[in-house]
Image (cartoon, helix red, strand yellow):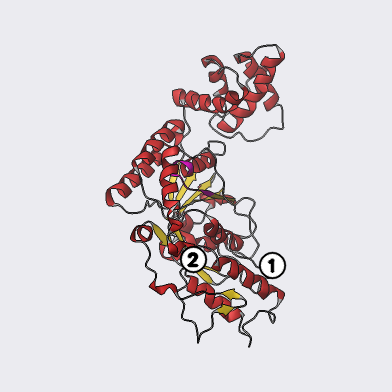
Amino acid sequence: MTQFDDDEPAGAAQDHARAAALPDDPAQRRPDRRLTRPGSADRIGGVELGDDPCGVTLDAIWRRQSAQIFDPGDVYEQMRLLAAGDDGGTSHLSSEDTARFEKLRWLAEQSARKPVLFGTAPMREQLSGLRARCPSFVALTDLVDRAVALSIMTGTPLSLPPLLLAGPPGVGKTHYSKSLAAVLGVPTHAWSCATNSDAMQLITGHPTSWRGARMGLLTEALITSGSASPVVLLDEIDKFVTHRDEQPYNIMLNVLEAENAEALLDEYVRVRFNVSHAFFIATANDVSALPDFIRDRFLIVAVVAPTGADLVALTRQIAAKVITPLGLPMPGDTALAALARHNPRRIARVLRLALGFAAAQGRDVLVPADVVAADGIASAQAARASIGFIRPRKETEADRE
């Protein structure tokens, strides 16, 4: 699953596009099938293996700017083990093994190499814009900017440790993660841990002995991705829902430990994948709900809620996203200040309701009274714990009078 939260910035997108265009190299057109085949066999289950390409030399630039994320030889070995009949065909396979063979056949047709991400000067410029748009994440943006600067200086791929964004719901952790991916010019593969009931399906895939076994979502996404360095977003990691006997956080060690990430075994296809170039970002509301060994493997970044002028500036950005497509004028400072009492998620909701009040009175300009009226509707629901930046003050005797 690949998605973008914002339009891809031009500078970063162009750099990434140049790297993605490199697959014109012969080695990208055909997987690197470094495989010793017995005798002269050149077919497995009807699949043409082609000539031995070991004499093909990868372009030096492409090799330097890309990474091999799986070994095609491992894929063909698994196919050979399945197609072990006398005729080298697959008619003898069970329905489960046939499905696995077809997945291996699909994998054999994919490129074994993907471009990795390097820092660029335009990327740093885009990060400056992100810093202004997301004031709550300045410390994290600065961390990424320094990593980009190091990549530029050394000519090595951009490297970031697994990041855990910790803070209350509604402060924009998910939005920032996707926006960062857009600035870097790489895709986002996002999964909600709160609604995921199978950690093995997400990360390692199922053993073939399982009913309904399948390839891991992570490894499958990496194969279909245009980059070896996507952002992998594990949203609400503190709410992992899973089977009773499963240990989801233990499974996550397969990608959070560098050595493990370089050789992640997909238990369905039984092929190892290099996911070490991916950027792992998790979000959590309650870090204390995570095991110590998981917290230890993340760089935990506490999200600081914006206040004062930063909060009003953030409100203006959110308002612009809602109002600009409607062709209406931006609210004044007083109306923005009234909206700024809410967390980002609620600002857009209240704003749309407020615009309805203004339109009903024939006005295209929002006034604070519209926001107050809209806030009354948005608040007229069952009492619940507040989220975001502002805690409601408790009702006093004077308020009731």
Residue at mark 1: 212
Say which label, 2 or 1, has the lower sequence index: 2
Determine whether, in the image, residue 93 is placed left or right of residue 341. Answer: right
Compare residues 374 and 319 and report the one nearer the observer: 319
Look at label 1 and name its amino acid: Gly
Mark 2: secondary structure: loop
Mark 1: secondary structure: loop
Coordinates of residue 343 in the picture (x, y in percent): 56, 31
Determine whether, in the image, residue 5 is placed left or right of residue 122. Answer: right
* Magenta stretch in the rendered image: 182-188
Q: Nearer the viewer, mark 2 or mark 1?
A: 2
Q: Is residue 187 magenta?
A: yes
Coordinates of residue 326 in the picture (x, y in percent): 62, 23
Compare residues 335 and 79 and report the one nearer the observer: 79
Coordinates of residue 10 in the picture (x, y in percent): 44, 38
Residue at mark 2: 30
Determine whether, in the image, residue 146 is placed left or right of residue 295. Answer: left
Compare residues 124 and 68 and report the one nearer the observer: 68
